Image (cartoon, rainbow, N blue to C red):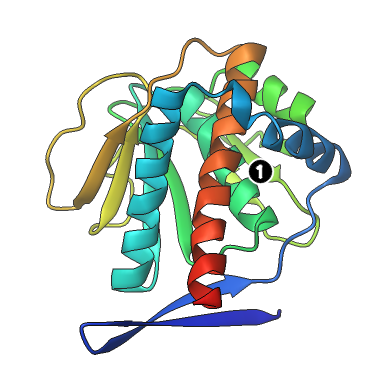
Amino acid sequence: MMKLRVLFGVAGLALVITASAQTALIKKLDRYSSIVSQESDLIPASRKEQLTSLADMIISANLKDGNSSLIFTDETNSGVSQIAQAFLQASIAKKGLAKVNIFSAGNTESAIDKQAIELLKSAGFSIECNTNFKKNPHYLLNYSWSENRIMLFSKKMDNFQIPATNLIVVSLDGNSVNDSPAINNKQSIPYGVVNETTLKEIAREMFFIAEKVQNNQLLSHQQ
């Protein structure tokens, strides 16, 4: 895979951000993402400030640590946090952004809302249910035929897959994010109930974040 390495001199240190070649999304998802990517004018100015702040957190973590780990949270990790994880993963892949790791979790575990799964499918994601898990179904999600699939399932913050340090935690249900040694930064961008309107809002805003991160890398490269 083609790599683009961008060097920054900060306080005498060379910091590296790596950008990968852009990933081709599944055709239906690519069409959907192209539409929502052009709807940033529908995002309120105050909301754009919050999303830009979140993008800045990702950029800062990449500069400092060479990568960033972001986790979306809601109470049961069953709805909007799963949708946000899927769309930000797809958007960073489409923009060719490497070293941005995306997770989701909740304060408790619950089965993922089936409506959330159906909405993701309607946007173009390919999703297959693993029937070995009855109470808390696991879903294999594809956003590109050339990339590894994502395993979606409801989980708590203490799940072994969640990094133990330097997390950017994003609350999506308005609940406060508890302080923890693992948390590097935190942000709150609440969403409403799981429905088609919320799906589009999340998709639109995740691509907005990815574009902000991409633009920063391109600008830094030009300098």
As drawn, is 126 to the left or to the right of 180?
Answer: right
Regarding residue 133, the answer to whether it shows in the image is: yes
Instruction: Kindly give the residue lying farthest to the front in the view shown.
Output: 223
Image position of 192 with respect to 63: above or below? above
Q: Position of residue 113 (x, y in %)?
A: 55, 18
As drawn, is 103 to the left or to the right of 14?
Answer: right
As drawn, is 53 to the left or to the right of 80?
Answer: left
Helix, strand, or loop for circle 1? Answer: strand
Name the residue located 53 percent from the left edge and 76 percent from the top edge. 221
Q: Position of residue 106 (x, y in %)?
A: 34, 30
Q: Which residue is mark 1?
A: 140
Question: Looking at numbered disc 1 in the image, what kind of residue is underneath it?
Answer: Leu
Instruction: Kindly give the residue lying farthest to the right in the view shown.
Output: 27
Q: Position of residue 161 (x, y in %)?
A: 39, 53
Residue 147 versus residue 43: which sits nearer the camera?
Answer: 43
Name the residue located 61 percent from the left edge and 31 percent from the top edge. 40
